[in-house]
Image: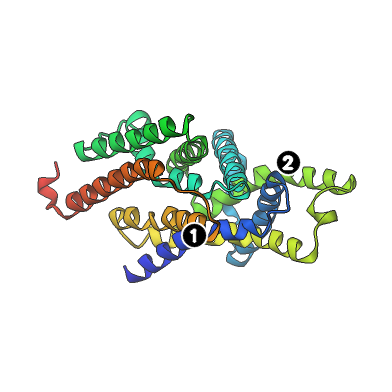
Amino acid sequence: MNAGVFYAALAYTAWGLLPIFFKQLGAVNPFQVVMHRMVWALVFLLCVLTVLRRWAWLRNVASQPRVLAAFAVSALLLSVNWSVYVWAVHNAHVVDASLGYFILPLVNVAFGFIFLKERPRPGQWLAVAVAATGVLWLAVQAGRLPWVALVLAFTFGFYGLLRKLATLGALEGLTLETLLLAPFAAGLLVWWTRHGQGALVQGDVATLGWLLLAGPITAVPLLLFAAGARRIPMATLGILQYISPSLQMLVGVWLYGEAFESARFGGFGLVWAALVVYSLEGLWIGRRPLSNQN
């Protein structure tokens, strides 16, 4: 239990501090950063699989078109999520990105109801309604939808839904997704290089070093998360997941000086209130005797 909490907390902390990493690549086009992230993550994951000697699954997947199609969709969602996130960090929208991951648990509740025929409890519906009110408030006071937050929340929500139904584990699934994305990413990197463009030609040694680190920085938190998720209850995991957007928001406001007006605080306050309702309701249900939970 204690080891599981440590692994999960470490994963969420790493994700929360991710904007600091991408800020080091501010001189590189965000789309290029994502292409490098795909390629070097695959290289790192292939090294891990080689050390663990876990290759049998790849042969089985190759003969299952439906599995390949499902992971092609999840890979596409992941690429959109990564692209918007890196763009947000490069363009001073870290706080908006944090909002997306604050509302993600509530998006998951709604998706469970719509796609998996799950029956959210009244407390969960209340949390979703309060969060939706917060997003609406932010849209009204800004004069536009908080599209960065919504794209991040919905792409990762759909991604999580597909991965929930998938047959592969975290390591194998991410490897297959990057394996599907890497040929496209590598092709673009080669094209940019041959035309004298891109970080591989124009970047200095420090920039190239940061890009190479994108592989382990992408994969290691996911592996830590998988190790933690196997050891602790879902209720505990649900509370720990707020470490990531909380750190992102603090990094955006305190480290990079992003604006956080009082009107905006009202919308975030509603989302935080929704998360409090969601978390307390989950803890209360989790501690009730099994016979009283029906």
Q: Residue at x 80, y 49 (%)?
A: 198
Cα–Cα gap, marks 1 and 2:
37 Å
265 horizontally vs 293: left or right: right
Pointer 1 local density, CA inside 10 Å: few below 14, some 14–19, many at least 20: few
**Residue most toward the right?**
195
Q: Amino acid at mark 2?
A: Phe
Q: Is residue 11 above or below residue 278?
A: below
Instruction: Using the rendered view, name the quadrant where residue 231 is placed.
Output: bottom left
Q: Is residue 274 above or below residue 240?
A: above
Quadrant position of the C terminus in the picture: top left
On the image, numbered disc 1 is attached to which residue? 254
Instruction: Name the element at disc 1.
Output: helix
Q: Is residue 45 visible?
A: no
Instruction: Using the rendered view, name the quadrant where residue 243 is placed.
Output: bottom left
**Residue most toward the front?**
262
Q: Residue at x 62, y 56 (%)?
A: 22
Residue 201: x and y, percent? Answer: 85, 55
First-in-chain label (1 vs 2): 2
Residue 33: x and y, percent? Answer: 69, 50
Quadrant position of the N terminus in the picture: bottom left
125 horizontally vs 260: left or right: left
227 horizontally vs 117: left or right: right
Label number found at residue 184? 2
Q: Is residue 213 visible?
A: yes
Residue 32: x and y, percent? Answer: 72, 47
Residue 38: x and y, percent? Answer: 66, 50
Please state which of residues 223 and 64 is positioned toward the viewer in this rendering.
223
